[in-house]
Every structure is written in C-alpha cells, then in structure tokens.
Amino acid sequence: MTRLPTLVRQAKACQICAPSLEHEPRPVFSAHAKAKLLLVGQAPGAKVHASGVPWADASGKRLRAWLGLDDETFYDETQVAILPMGFCFPGTGKSGDLPPRPECAPQWMQPFIDKMPQLQLTLLIGMYAQRWFLKESAKATLTKTVEAWQDYVDRGFFVLPHPSPRNGIWLRRNPFFEAELVPLLQSRVATALGR
C-alpha cells in the first residue's frame, strides 16, 4: 500500500499531462494525513505556477477571507489540504485560464483522499470540482449549485464560486452568498479545525 509521502513524491514528479502543456509541468498542491479541511479548486494560475505556492494570488486572498483563516493556518498542511482538479497550470486561453487537464483528477484525487482519514469538510470551489464530487446532484449551472448549497452541507461539502476578482459581478448579483453562506462556512471551517 502506497503511503502518503510516497504519493506526494509521485504526484510532484507527475508528467501525465506534459504532452498537452506549453510549459514544464509543476504540480502545486498540499496534502497531509492529519488535514481536517480539503479545498478542491480548479487548477493553479500563472502566478501560482511561477511561485509554487497554492492560492498565492488575489483569488487566494479572497478565499482566505471567506474562510476566516489567516495565512499561517491556511498554509498549515496538517490542517488544510489543497488538491485542485488539475495540479498543473493548464495554460491561458482566449478568455482566461484553460480548464484543468482531464487526466489529473482521475489519476490523483481519490488516492489522496483515501490517505487523509481525518478530513471533516470539503470545499468545492468552482464548477469543475462541483461536477466531479457531486456528480448527478450538481445543478445545471454553478449559480444553481451554489444557490442549493444547503443540499450539500450535510454531506460534508460546501459549494463555492471561484474567488477570482473577475467574479465581482457574480457576487453582486448573488448577495445571499456572502450574507448567508459565508458566515456558516466560517463557523464550519472553525469547527472542522477545532478552533
């Protein structure tokens, strides 16, 4: 049976999507057997690809505010695991970053989750994560899925929009998210982390 440190080394050396990338693969994620909170986003952006630090950008700053976590706690892998749907920056398309490479999640997601038995709460950030984890119970759009957030909380999931600054319009059109969901999210995150 593969131990988590071995799995981490294997994933850090992964080349599965190399033929499809315009740059060298650089998997960016974190995982620890003691982690209580799992964040599943889309894929690293260009800034994160350059730094190698997950969520080290404006989106990450907003995400940490939503969660009520400081940088120290957020980046403590014994508390927070970060497994995007694609571990590597997929490149840039006409209207932003490309979708996560489809090879990644089937290869790595479940093996990592299986090695983190203390997970208490999983945050599904964006459409790709929501469709992967929620399967047929995901709604037709991200907005509809987030509007139905109460359907998923008892299953241990919080569904979130992407915290990108580009989503400011979405947040203004959907004030329920920050008014209703974020306070409960912060409470559940604190409980999961034993705070």
Image (spheres, rainbow, N blue to C red):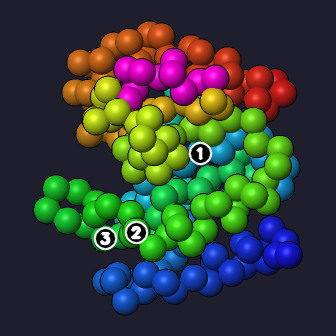
2 or 3: tag closer to the N-terminus: 3
| Residue at numbered disc 3 | 91
Three-letter amino acid code of the residue under disc 1: Leu
Which numbered disc covers residue 102? Answer: 2
Q: Is residue 115 magenta?
A: no
The quarter of the picture where residue 4 lies is: bottom right
Q: How many C-alpha atoms fall within 10 Å of the one at disc 3: few (<14), some, or many (≥20)?
A: many
Three-letter amino acid code of the residue under disc 2: Pro
Q: Residue at x 40, y 68 (%)?
A: 102
Q: Position of residue 144 (x, y in %)?
A: 32, 26
Mark 3 or mark 1, whichever is nearer to me: 1
- Looking at the figure, which quarter contains the C terminus? top right
Three-letter amino acid code of the residue under disc 3: Gly
Residue furthest front as drawn:
136
| Residue at numbered disc 1 | 39
Q: How many C-alpha atoms fall within 10 Å of the one at disc 2: few (<14), some, or many (≥20)?
A: few
SS label for mark 2: loop
